[in-house]
Amino acid sequence: MARIAYFGPQGTFTEQAARVLAAGDELVPAETIRLALTAVRHGEADAACVPVENSVEGAVTATLDGLSDADPLVAVAEAILPVHFSVLKRPGTTEIRTVASHPHALAQVRDWLEANLPGATPVASSSTAAAAVGVHAGDFDAAVTAPVAVEHYPLEVVATGVADVSDARTRFLLVRKPGELPEPTGADRTSIVAAAVNRTGTLAELLTELASRGINLTRLDARPTRDNFGEYRFFIDFEGHVAEPRIIDALAALRRRCRNLRFLGSHPRADGIRSTIEPGADNDSFLDATAWVDAVRKGDLA
Ligand SMILES: O=C(O)C(=O)Cc1ccccc1
């Protein structure tokens, strides 16, 4: 049985995602995203489950930074979960003055809090379940949590199904040390992080390498390199799998252009959306073009 570290403690949204991505495996909570990734790097876990992107708040920066620093890790699977929150309090609490949660959760219930708990002060906690632990310990009056949290902590439900945006979703990754990659399915996502030299047009050039090969982007985020003020690295997700000739061609071009390029994985998309294939940019066209150049080099064609 594999050992899977997840961003915990018990009762987080990430635990729910880990149950989808690693059903039947041993799930081990880690206090932070970074610690979940470190457990894999140190060989204490076979894989880690971490949140990466939210439809309302965008990138989970702790995951982006954690994947681009230290030894390489690659995503081998993803899950997309709908995100609706419960608000929990200690039994007997009559006045709610503080409401704790993960910053991504607080940002997604801002309107609800204003309308329903107008006097309450939001307090950031390391995760939604850590907020529940804090409420139980008496540190806060209420917590914004995943619906399952109430099964783990002896708290009382104030409200369920809370969400300012009704179809909010979060995408989670299962990451491992580099090794065998998942097979391509035709509905895959590839992720990279690229550090380009800081001069006019570099980002446009990187994106053009993808666009000119008909490769559709699914996400673009920038994070500071932290070494030099004003220098950024770009997290780019796009349709396709590193086993495909069109993606191999694009990655080779990006490798030439980047000061630093890290492959963060190719895996099936949780939404099953098949890659967009532009006319003349299908894999057969890339194979055919390479075969033509080979034939020319051998003197078989002109
Ligand atoms: O804190 C959690 O429960 C997490 O798994 C992170 C998170 C926070 C808010 C929405 C989705 C995931």
Image (cartoon, helix red, strand yellow):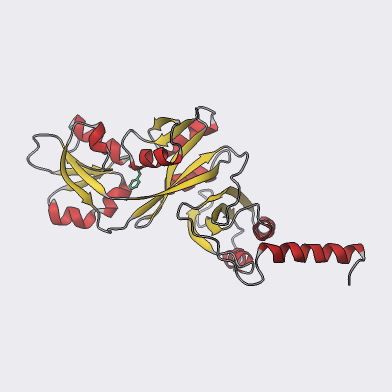
The residue depicted at 78 percent of the width and 62 percent of the height is 290
Q: Quadrant of residue 24?
A: top left
Classify the position of the C terminus by image quarter. bottom right
Q: Is residue 51 above or below residue 285?
A: above
Q: Is residue 79 left or right of residue 167?
A: right
Q: Position of residue 280 (x, y in %)?
A: 67, 71
Q: Position of residue 159 (x, y in %)?
A: 17, 47
The answer to whether residue 176 shows anywhere in this view is yes
- Front-lying residue, 213 or 301: 301
- Front-lying residue, 243 or 104: 243
The answer to whether residue 232 shows anywhere in this view is no
Q: Is residue 237 left or right of residue 209?
A: left
Q: Is residue 201 above or below residue 50?
A: below
Q: Quadrant of residue 247?
A: bottom right
Q: Position of residue 233 (x, y in %)?
A: 54, 54
The residue depicted at 12 percent of the width and 43 percent of the height is 96
Disc tally is 0
- Front-lying residue, 20 or 159: 20
Q: Position of residue 60 (x, y in %)?
A: 41, 49
